[in-house]
Amino acid sequence: MVAETIVGMRGLRSTIALVVVLAGLAAYIYFVTWKKPAEPTSKQEKVFAGLQTDKIDELKVTSDKGEVSSLKKDHGNWQLMAPVAAKADEMEATAIANALGQLEIVRVIDENPSDLKDYGLAMPRIEVEFKAAGDKEYRRLFIGEKSPTGADLFAKRNDEKKVFLIPAFQETTLNRSTFDLRDKTLLKFERDKVDGVEVNVGGKTVQLAKDNAEWKITQPLQTQADLGSIEGLIGRVQTAAMKSMVTETASAADLKKYGLDKPAASIDLKLGSARATLALGGRADDNTVYARDTSKPTVVTVDSALADELKKGADAYRRKDIFEFRPFNATRIEVARSGQTVAFEKTKGQGKDAGDKWRRVSPTAGDVDKDKIDALISRLSSMRAASFVDASAKTGLSTPAMTVTAKFEDGKKEERVTFGKVDSDVYAARSGEPGAAKVDTMDFTEANKTLDELSK
């Protein structure tokens, strides 16, 4: 019993000793690492008081990986000067300048530190240098380790002894690599000057040409193109960004290594007599492929979704609308089916504030239900191709189920669309255009039902 009591007392003494040690360690952290001023000011002091961010015209950033990047403003635009000469990422450079101007001291930790190692500032992890208008020498911000809570960073200026805290979230803005700071635009061109596009994938070519405001497919077939699809493609290329820099100066061996000697895909944008060409090579990883602007010696990686975009083929760029007319500009609709033709015309309303009115003009003249004729015209004008077939064989178009002739824009334009039906599938062919489009069967069925009601 006595022995057990002695053992218990020894255990208690060990526990007390451990508590004392921990308390001492906590006191050390508090008094040595967290030397807090008597009372923090209600308004936080700026790290660089009076600094106007728009006056900063030089930056030098040393990241925690040791990369040193120098930037300079040239006619209001940031340029990367070293370690490579390139256009800078305006958003990244401006964000650093803004952060320097807005940076606030959370709390002064030590007015006269005896050892900067305590704060990770003997050899700072991150260093940001800058010159503003009128500065002869660089002003510097040194950033060390995170505070014990992780909410702040130890920091100091080069011209002061004191160590202070800045918010930890600022590290995301200030700790930038050379790649972070360079412009990552893959291919530079003026979008409104693009008047031709050529896409090559696996030996197959799609050519697109702009005719005034309209786009056309000229190869492998000649037909109207979908404006939205073409603009979407051009926009996708214009906004494509590098994911990483592979090499600044690619050799012939490099091009072969990355599959760029014989690109898997390429897109050539024609801007009058000028050209901008992007080539895509082999896969870099699961999500990226190698790429290069053929006018430059660099090889980069880009999101593999861009390669997938180029593989879509000519059908992706064909006009999907079966009809060009719209309900607001249609003036005559003529429908032939089962050996009979019914026609409707829009007539101008009579009298003040009278609206236009649709009437049946053949085979028998008469008024028609406004809601039904509006429904028919709306359904026809909204028909879109789900897919395309190369020829009219096995589409039922040799013995049409329905032919619609529409006049629009005050009768200045006319278009004709023939519909064929095979089992439950419906196809549509536009006069003068190759192949046929597969359309929604429900649209065709409902249009026929409405026609039956309007023909009575």
Image: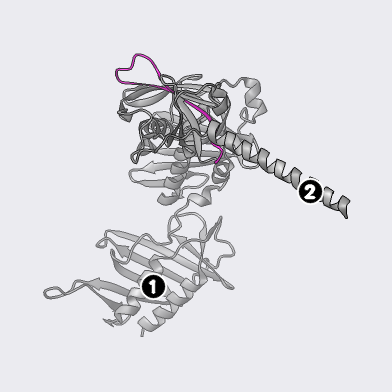
- Nearer the observer, 130 or 299: 130
Q: Position of residue 132 (x, y in %)?
A: 33, 22
Q: Which disc, if any, is residue 72?
A: none
Q: Position of residue 175 (x, y in %)?
A: 50, 31
**Residue appearing at x 55%, y 47% in the figure:** 313
How crowded pointer 2 is (Cα within 10 Å; few <14, some 14-19, many 20+) is rated as few
**Which color scheme is applied?**
one colour
Q: Position of residue 325 (x, y in %)?
A: 34, 62
For marks 1 and 2, the one nearer the N-term is 2
Q: Is residue 396 above or below residue 141?
A: below
How crowded pointer 1 is (Cα within 10 Å; few <14, some 14-19, many 20+) is rated as some
**Residue appearing at x 52%, y 33% in the figure:** 278
Q: Amino acid at mark 1?
A: Val
The N terminus is located in which quarter? Answer: bottom right
Q: Is residue 324 above or below residue 39?
A: below
Residue at numbered disc 1: 335
Q: How many marks?
A: 2
Q: What is the C-alpha distance between the residues marked 1 and 2?
A: 105 Å
Left or right: residue 67 versus residue 335 is right
Q: Position of residue 257 (x, y in %)?
A: 67, 27
- Nearer the observer, 275 or 415: 275
Residue 203 visible? no
As drawn, the residue found furthest toward the left would be: 352
Q: Which disc, if any, is residue 9?
A: 2
Q: Amino acid at mark 2?
A: Met
Q: Secondary structure at mark 2?
A: helix
Residue 292 visible? yes
**Residue appearing at x 63%, y 21% in the figure:** 252
Q: What residue range appears in magenta?
A: 129-149
The verdict on residue 140 being magenta is yes
- Nearer the observer, 16 or 262: 16
**Residue appearing at x 87%, y 52% in the figure:** 2
